[in-house]
Amino acid sequence: MVPEDPAWRGTSQLLPMVSRQPGQASRSLPRHGKESLEMKRALITGVTGQDGAYLSELLLSKGYEVHGVKRRSSSFNTGRIDHLYQDPHAGGVKYRLHYGDMTDATNLIRLVQEVQPDEIYNLAAQSHVQVSFETAEYTANSDALGTLRLLEAIRILGLEKKTRFYQASTSELYGKVQETPQRETTPFYPRSPYAAAKIYAYWITVNYREAYGMHASNGILFNHESPIRGETFVTRKITMAVAAIQQGLQDCLYLGNLDARRDWGHARDYVEGMWRILQQETPSDYVLATGETHSVREFVERAFAEVGRKIVWQGKGVDETGTDAESGTVVVRVDPRYFRPTEVELLLGDPTKAHTVLGWKHTTPFADLVKEMVAADVARLASKTKLRHAE
């Protein structure tokens, strides 16, 4: 529920905070606006998602007043941010939620007018690539035109010089990659309705920056995961299945293209990059990535290894299976339904510009990311099982 409702439930879920590694120096960043200790105000669309939750925590830790936009739902959808809830009746509330939708221009204009944000982080999207083939029109309306609506709200309200705008772009823009690794200058070649919609969002952000002098920037983020990644995304699907198979609650994990390669990082690292992008005096576009690539197959192997299982692969194509080496049981199968109409085989980012200009680098190695996600899902499932038995 939204914070205005006192029944909004708190949970014990805590997200890891973004912090410097031991020995890592703090980098001085330029700050916009007055140099006094005035509290900055941020508006986050897509606040209930993985990135919205981590970004909320980061900004609150930096003293921001944070306003989040969430869609109306008949069921609770605030699980990732419940622990951030602040009673609106108390004084000094720094975290508020508002109903909104990227397809509703008047609603977005009203929200921007009311909040008067110093920074807008546009994270809202229909972000599932496979789903975008089935809901192409909605994806375009939300992801492409939704971005335009927010930029227009800034322009119409005369906030071009006050409000800085961050657009969540995606490595899916590169699609059928034209060079490897992919950097800010690499040509785009979208391979899905989602990527096509995001290309419009990318270029309309650039256009409003150039046409109206807005501080509007794109963060081209490569795949970033965490224990609170959506359950329909392949990494979380894998770690949840590993936990369920280990506890005897599931027989097999079904996947599509095992050889697809992605540049996977941790979401808590990437939201730090988002924030750094908006602290620069000059707006620009940045690739945020680890500079490493791993296959879905490797993710599966590492995930099962975390629970002491070695996977042996047999067969080819749709007939390929992954077998538990010790028991001989097939625990991974290929399902053709999970193949995309147009596949993206390889994504590998070059974050040199972000390293040089922003002082940003990812801090979580691939192996640690997989370990954290598997451990979280094993613990989560064990807790649910214990509660059921207690009943």
Image (spheres, rainbow, N blue to C red):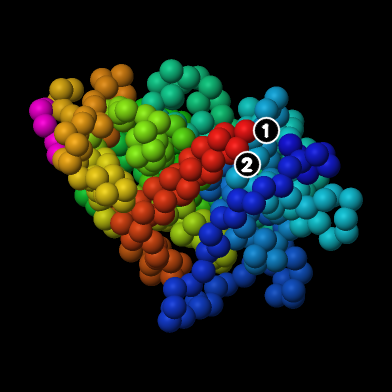
Amino acid type at circle 1 is Phe
The image quadrant where one finds the N terminus is: top right
- In depth, the one of 345 and 188 nearer the eye is 345
Q: Which residue is mark 1?
A: 76
Give the residue displayed 84% in from the left and 60% down from the top: 92
Residue range of the region highlighted in magenta in the rendering: 312-316
Q: Is residue 127 above or below residue 39?
A: above
Q: Which residue is mark 2?
A: 79
Amino acid type at circle 2 is Gly
Q: Is residue 195 above or below residue 182?
A: above
Classified by dominant secondary structure, the portion drawn in magenta counts as strand
Q: Residues within 10 Å of mark 1 (few under 14, many from 20)?
A: few
Percent x, y of residue 210:
53, 49
Percent x, y of residue 180:
22, 49
The image quadrant where one finds the C terminus is: top right
* C-alpha span from label 1 to label 2: 7 Å
- In depth, the one of 144 and 49 nearer the eye is 49
Q: Is residue 390 visible?
A: yes
- In depth, the one of 84 and 371 nearer the eye is 371
- Disc 2 element: loop
Q: In the figure, is residue 361 to the left or right of 310? A: right
Q: Are marks 1 and 2 in contact (CB under 8 Å)?
A: yes
- In depth, the one of 328 and 301 nearer the eye is 328
Q: Is residue 213 visible?
A: no
**Residue 279 is inside the magenta segment:** no
Give the residue displayed 47% in from the left and 48% down from the top: 379
Q: Is residue 148 above or below residue 287?
A: above
Q: Is residue 195 above or below residue 15?
A: above
Residue 61 quadrant: bottom right
